[in-house]
Each structure stands twice: as structure tokens, then as C-alpha cells.
Amino acid sequence: MKTISLERSYGGTQGVYAHRSNICNCDMTFAVYLPPQAQERPCPVVWYLSGLTCSHANVMEKGEYRRAAALLGLIVVCPDTSPRGADVPDDSDNWQFGSGAGFYLDATCPPFDVNYRMYSYVSEELARLIASEFPADMARQGVFGHSMGGHGAITLALKHPDRFRSCSAFAPIARPTLAGWSRPAFERYLGTDEGAWRQYDSCALIEDGFRFPELLVDQGTADAFIEDGLHPSELQRACEKAGIRLNLRMQEGYGHSYYFISTFMEDHLKWHAERLNR
């Protein structure tokens, strides 16, 4: 692991790091905020998964999470959203596929299956690295994210309820198998058998018996992607049928950007801290 940068912030440290990923077969970059409490003891970990076109840097620069994380004693881990590099296949004319659009799945179709394995990268390889290199209490983990990252967060929590104690999302892509911006990507990553897509669809996972105790979701009412891309009503319907406690907060007038995310970031971190410190 190589340290790219370290900055003091709210008594803690914001770091950016790089390492060679054996799962993604390329160099990967990620960010970690260590609160001041981490100087004395291991701290709970909250994973933030970013959305389409983003990297680790977007939330680090716009998300306004450090003050709350410092007060609450939370480590915040921000992975990249896809593999990157000259040897990684991409579609530079399509912002909904390839670089910045890994969808937190493991591709099975060539040539993307060699590198685009973000599900295993986040859930296995990066988790091991965080556990070994940082003062992280891996028995207390939460996960949240935005849009594509909200989709990733909920699917990870549903598949690993023994690992994550809390899960929340900002405007998640709740039903990617129906959404206009994810269906073409799923087909190129996973093939035409839509049955294979269900393992990366939050609503489908719930329908197939996967469970998580409770979810917090914030959704802006002025979000331009709410109808074709996000489908919060689908998530609400699936959770109600399965008996999952979903706190879906429709936030009047908010859109899809980091103006929305930063407004409710502290709410989400407090929500995670309450559950991680029980």
C-alpha cells in the first residue's frame, strides 16, 4: 500500500492511498478518514460507495462528512467506483459504463470480467486491507452510498447482514434491472440472462429471501432520475412485503447532487453511529 496524501482535518487525518489489486488486476485508489479517537483505540468503520462518474475523491471533496465523523469517532472508507488504467477496457463515450461505472458487481463477460470485479474488491480485498493497515474495529461496520453506490450499499448489506450492522443510502438505484441507465451496463457486464442480474438488484434480493433489519433512505423529490433510474417505490414495496423496516424520507425540493448529499450526511452518520455503538 502506498500513501498518496495525508491531510489534517477536525483533529483526525484524511488519507488517500493506492495499492495493487489482485481482484481487479490493476492499481486501485481509495480514501480513508481516521477520526481523532483512532489514535487511541480501534474505531467503527462506515463504508461510503459513490455513484456514476465518481471516484473516491467526490465525496471526500464535497460530502462534508469529516466534522461529524470526528465527533462520532467513525472511520470513513471511500473506495473507487471502478477499476482504472490503460489496460482496463472502457467505453469512454458512455458515462454509464466502464470507468466510473463498475456498479459494484463482478462481471462475467469478456473482456470486462478480468478487471470489473468491484463486488469482490469491496467485500473481500479492500476489507482485508482496511483490517490490516488501519485501527479499524471490523466487528462494527456500516455501509452507505449514493445512487449507484446506494445500490451497492444495500446489496452488500443484504448479502452480508452478519458483517454490517447498519445500512443507508442517498437516492439509490433500487431496481437496476429496470433502470434505463443500468440495464445496458448489466447486459455488457453479466450477459443477456436477466436471472443472473438479480444478485445485484436490491429489490430482487429481497424478493429472493435476503434480509436486513432496517434501512434509511433519503430521496430528493426534485431528482431528475427518480422515475426511470431510481424507483424508490419499488424498494418501499419490496421492504413492506418482506417486513424490512425502511425509513424512506422524501426530501422536498432536493435533487441528485452533492448539495443534497451533504445536507443529510450528518443525519446518516449519526444514524450509523447509533447502531454501531449499541
Image (cartoon, helix red, strand yellow):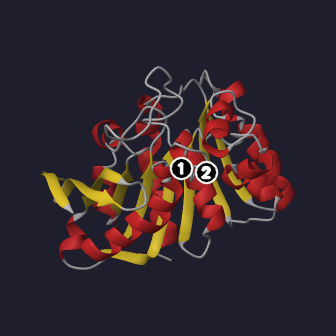
The spot of residue 142 in percent (x, y) is: 49, 64
The spot of residue 19 in percent (x, y) is: 26, 58
Disc 1 secondary structure class? helix
Q: Is residue 1 left or right of residue 171?
A: left
Q: Residue at x 70, y 51 (%)?
A: 202
Counting residues from the N terminus, which is met first, the one under dot 1 or under dot 2?
A: 2
The spot of residue 141 in percent (x, y) is: 46, 69
Question: Furthest-front residue in view?
Answer: 110
Disc 2 secondary structure class? loop
The spot of residue 169 in percent (x, y) is: 56, 47
Q: Residue at x 72, y 59 (%)?
A: 245
In the rendered view, would you say 223 is above or below 48?
above
Cα–Cα span, label 1 and label 2:
5 Å
- The amino acid marked with disc number 2 is Thr
Label 1 neighbourhood size at 10 Å, few (<14), some (14-19), many (20+)?
some
Judging by the rendered image, the residue that carries numbered circle 1 is: 113
Label 2 neighbourhood size at 10 Å, few (<14), some (14-19), many (20+)?
some
Nearest the viewer among 268 and 200 is: 200
Quadrant into which the N terminus falls: bottom left
In the rendered view, would you say 26 is above or below 70?
above
In the rendered view, would you say 86 is above or below 116?
above
- The amino acid marked with disc number 1 is Asp
Tag 1 near tag 2, CB within 8 Å: yes
Question: Furthest-right residue in view?
Answer: 241
Judging by the rendered image, the residue that carries numbered circle 2 is: 108
Which of the labelled discs sits on residue 261, or is there none?
none
Q: Can residue 43 be seen at all in this image of the molecule? A: no
Q: Residue at x 45, y 59 (%)?
A: 121
Q: Residue at x 69, y 42 (%)?
A: 191
Q: Is residue 166 left or right of residue 10?
A: right
